[in-house]
Image: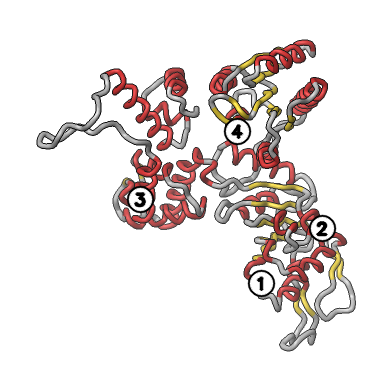
Amino acid sequence: MPKVLILDDDPMMNEALANVVARLGHEPSCAFTLSEGLDLAREEAYDVVFLDVRLPDGNGLEALPSLRAGPGAPEVIIITGYGDPDGAELAVKNGAWDYIQKPSSMGRMSLALSRALQYRAEKTVRPGPMVLKREGIVGASLRLNEALERLAQASQTEGNVLIEGETGTGKELLARAVHENSPRAGRRFVVVDCAALPESLVESILFGHEKGAFTGADRAHEGLIQQAHGGTLFLDEVGELPLPVQKAFLRAVQERRFRPVGSDREIGVDFRLIAATNRDLERMAQEGRFRKDLLYRLRTHFIQAPPLRERREDIRELAVYHVNRLCERYGTETKGFSPEFFEALSLYEWPGNVRELFNTMEEALAAAGDEPTLYPYHLPIALRARVARSSVENHEEGLPAPSSPSGPLEQGPLPTLKAFREEAERRYLQRLWHRTGASRKEMCRVSGLSRTRLFELLKKHGIPS
C-alpha cells in the first residue's frame, strides 16, 4: 500500500487530504511542523509527500532536497496558499513533482497524487539503471546523482543536450560522459571553445572555408562541424556565440547541413550536439542577446551541473581522488589527511567549484613536500584566512568569556549551570553541522553520538538535520 505524508500546519487541510488519500486506498500520515515531517520522512519510506511552503519552523522549499533524499525517495507535491513564481521555479528545479496553489480542489490534489504514484509504479518495472562510464566524475551526493540520472537519459537518445552550471563545475566532464555512454562512443568528440573564437573568424572555424574565400585563405579549410561528422560536437560557453553566427548555426542544427564560407554548395553532416554555458540563456533570450529558436533547439535534454557548495558531502572524496592522482603522476608517496584538513575544506564556499578545489589540492601537495600528512597549514593562506573570517562572521554571539583574574567581572547575571550547558551544547552542534557539511554520517563519527541521539539533539536546538 503506497504511503503518503502530508506536511501542512493547517489541521483542516491535513484532515481533508488524509481523507482523500485513505479513500484512494493509500496510507496517510500527517505532520504539522517541518521538523516533525523530516523525522517521519527519515523513518518511513514514503511514496509521495504533500509539502506546504510556509511552516511554523521553516520553509518547505528549503527542505525539499532532504525529503527527496529519504529512504523512499518520494515524489514531492508542493501545496501553498502563497503563490510565488520564483518559488514555483525553484521547486521544479529541485525536483518537485507538482506545484499546486491553494485553494485548489481535492480533485486537483488527488489527480496529482495518482499521476505521481502511476509514475513510480511504471518506474519500478523498467530495466535497472545503466552502468555509466563516468571517468573523472567523483561523488555520490543527491545533487550529483540527479545530474547523472539526466545524463543517463540523454545518452540513450540522439537529442541535443544543454548543460548549465557555474565555472568549474565540470560541464565538459558531463558532456564527455554523455558521448562515452552514447552509441557514438569511440568516435570523435570535437570541442569548440566559443569564448576563445575570434569574432572575425568564427564562421570560418565552425563551417570551414574554400580557398580564396577571404584574404589569407590560401587553401581550403575543414570546419569543426565537419570534423565532428559521425561523432559529437561540444560547444563550450555557447552563450558567447555572436548573434549573426547563431542564425547560421541554427540551420546547421536543424537541417544538419551547412555551407562553408566562400562555397556555393551545401554539405550534409551527421553529428550529436552538446552545448554548455555558465550564463542564463533564458534571460539572454528575453533581452535579445541570444536567439530563442536556437535555445529551444539546444535544450532537448537539460542537465544542471551542481555547484560544489550544494554537494559538500562530495568534497572529501574529491580531495582524496585528486591528491592520489597527483601523487601517482609525480611518483610520490600517497599522502594522509588530518581530520582538520577536511574540516577546513568543508567550511570554505568554493566559488570556483571543483576546479578551485583541485587547484587547491595541488598547492597543498606542493606546500607539504615530503611530509606524509596534509594539515590545514598546507592550504593556501588566502583560503585559510577566508575560512577564519567567515567562521567568525557567521558564528552567533558566543557565551560570556570568563573574566581574567585581574580584570572586572563581566556585566549581567551569571547563567545557571543548566543554561550554560544548553548553550554550549547548541554551539557545539552548530560547529559540528558546519564543519561536516551537514553529513549525518560524519557528524556521528566526529561527535561519537548515535544516529538517534544526534537527531534528537539537532531537533531540540532547531538545527537542520
Q: Which residue is mark 3?
A: 384
Q: Which residue is mark 1?
A: 197
In terms of sequence position, does the residue under pointer 3 or pointer 4 come before the other? 4
Q: Position of residue 335 (x, y in %)?
A: 36, 47
Q: Are marks 1 and 3 in contact (CB under 8 Å)?
A: no
> Residue 293 has which mark?
2
| Mark 4 Cα shell of 10 Å, populated few (<14), some (14-19), many (≥20) | some
- Please tell me how many numbered marks the rendered image carries: 4
The amino acid type, in three-letter code, at marker 2 is Asp
Q: Position of residue 396 (x, y in %)?
A: 37, 36
The amino acid type, in three-letter code, at marker 1 is Leu
Mark 2 residue element: helix
From the image, state whether disc 1 or disc 2 is nearer to you: 2
> Residue 65 has which mark?
4
Q: Is residue 338 left or right of residue 97?
A: left
Q: How far apart are the alpha carbons under marks 4 and 2?
A: 32 Å
In terms of sequence position, does the residue under pointer 3 or pointer 2 come before the other? 2
- The one nearer the camera, 279 or 254, is 279
Q: Residue at x 45, y 19 (%)?
A: 456
